[in-house]
Amino acid sequence: MIILACDHAGFPLKEQIKAFFNSENITTIDVGTYSSEPVDYPDYAKAGCERVLENKQNIGIFICGTGIGMSIASNRNPNIRAALCSSTEVASFARKHNDANVLILAGRYMNKNKAIKAIKAFLTTDFEKGRHAIRIKKL
Ligand code: RB5
C-alpha cells in the first residue's frame, strides 16, 4: 500500500500526486494534512510512519516544503529508511542501495512531472541486497 503524508507546504504537491495515483486506479492511504492550513510536519511524519510500518510491502511518500523536516522526523524510526530525493536517478539509488521505504519530496522545490518520474523510479526499482544489505543491517 502507498501511504501519503504531508504538511501544509507539501499539500499542493501531495494533492497532485494523489490525483495521479487515482487516475492510475492505484489506491493510496492519505494520512493528511488535508489543507494549506499550517501544521507541524513531525505529526504527519509520525502518522505516515505508523502506517508504513504496518506492512513490509508498504511504501511512504512524504512531502514538506524542503523535504528536510519530514526526513529528520521519519528517520527517527529504526525501521524507516526515508530518502529525500531530488531526481529520478537519486530515487532509484535510494531503492537499489538503501532499500528506502519512504520517498521524501520537497514540495516547494519540485514540480508535479518531476515528482511523478521520481515516484515511478522509486516504485519500480528493487533493492540490490549483497553489500548493501550488510550496510543496512549496520544502521
Ligand atoms: C514549513 O514552512 C516548512 O518549514 C516545512 O514544510 C519543512 O520544509 C521543514 O523542513
Image (cartoon, rainbow, N blue to C red):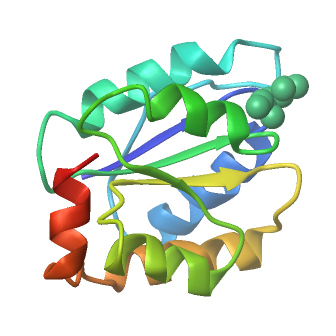
Is 38 placed above or below 13 here?
A: above
Which residue lies at the image location 69% right of the left edge and 13% below the top edge? 40
Pinpoint residue 131: horizontal percent, then vertical percent: 20, 79
Choose top left, top right, bottom left or bottom right for residue 110.
bottom right
Choose top left, top right, bottom left or bottom right for residue 8.
top right
Which residue lies at the image location 56% right of the left edge and 67% below the top edge? 20
Pinpoint residue 90: horizontal percent, then vertical percent: 58, 78
Q: Nearer the viewer, residue 44 or 97?
A: 97
Q: Is residue 118 left or right of residue 36?
A: left
Name the residue at the right extreme: 108
Question: Can residue 24 be seen from the camera position used here?
Answer: no
Which residue lies at the image location 54% right of the left edge and 13% below the top edge? 43
Q: Report the number of discs.
A: 0
Q: Nearer the viewer, residue 2 or 118?
A: 118
Question: Can residue 123 be seen from the camera position used here?
Answer: yes
Is 13 placed above or below 10 here?
A: below
Pinpoint residue 12: horizontal percent, then vertical percent: 78, 45
Is 83 placed above or below 23 here?
A: above
Q: Quadrant of ligand 1?
A: top right
Pinpoint residue 104: horizontal percent, then vertical percent: 58, 51
Is 94 placed above or below 16 here?
A: below
Q: Is residue 56 left or right of residue 124?
A: left
